[in-house]
Image (cartoon, helix red, strand yellow):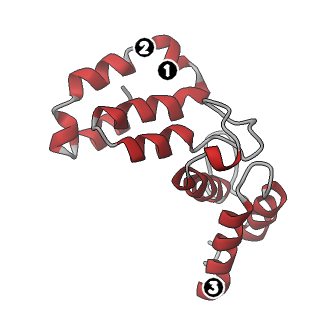
Amino acid sequence: MRSSTASKLQACPQILALAAQVEALAGNVELAANATSHAAWGGEIVALLAAETMERIVRHHHERLDGKGYPDGLAGERIPLGARIVAVAECIHNMLSDLRYKSARTFEDALAELRRCSGTQFDPAVVTAFLDWLEFHGHPREP
């Protein structure tokens, strides 16, 4: 298990009690080697906590409205609403962040990409709610 993940898990005593089971999941080399497996792997960890609703959100946050996502290829309303919300939030965060494989986008460019993918990758109602929230609260300043 990566040290950042381990330290986050150790922060909660309930999760720490499940460390042996989590380590067994993390030890699955095939699962860990697949870059798209983190949603399913995260879902399995949350499932250990008997948090079914959270497990579904974590597991399905990379599904796409058009059914071309992962890990289960769910589409439309079959994707839990919480997962559709997390998908938009994670996407915006990643687009605005410098990551080891890409530079951060401008805020306007990130919003344009979000709009472009509304209806295929993202739930249009979630995108609209996010954009309405920004309209009401204002756009954050760029660094």
Q: Position of residue 36 (x, y in %)?
A: 61, 29
Q: Circle 2 sits on which residue?
A: 28
Q: Secondary structure at mark 2?
A: loop
Residue shown at the point (62%, 87%) measured from the top left:
136
What's the residue type where badge 1 is placed?
Ala
Q: Residue 85 occupies which quadrant of the picture?
A: bottom right
As shown in the figure, which amino acid type bears the numbered disc 3? Gly
Residue beneath label 3, please?
138
| Cα distance in 3D space between marks 1 and 3 | 39 Å
Residue tagged by mark 1? 32
Mark 3 burial class by Cα count in 10 Å: few <14, some 14-19, many 20+:
few
Residue at horizontal 56 percent and vertical 55 percent from the top: 81
Pointer 2 local density, CA inside 10 Å: few below 14, some 14–19, many at least 20: few
- The x, y position of residue 58, in whole percent, is 48, 42
Rendered location of residue 19, percent (x, y): 22, 27
Identify which residue, 27 or 53, lies in the foreground.
Answer: 53
Amino acid, disc 2: Asn
Up the image or down, 86 lies above or below 26; here it is below
Do labels 2 and 1 touch, CB within 8 Å? yes
Which residue sits furthest right?
116
- Find numbered disc 3 in the image and state the secondary structure of the residue it sits on: loop
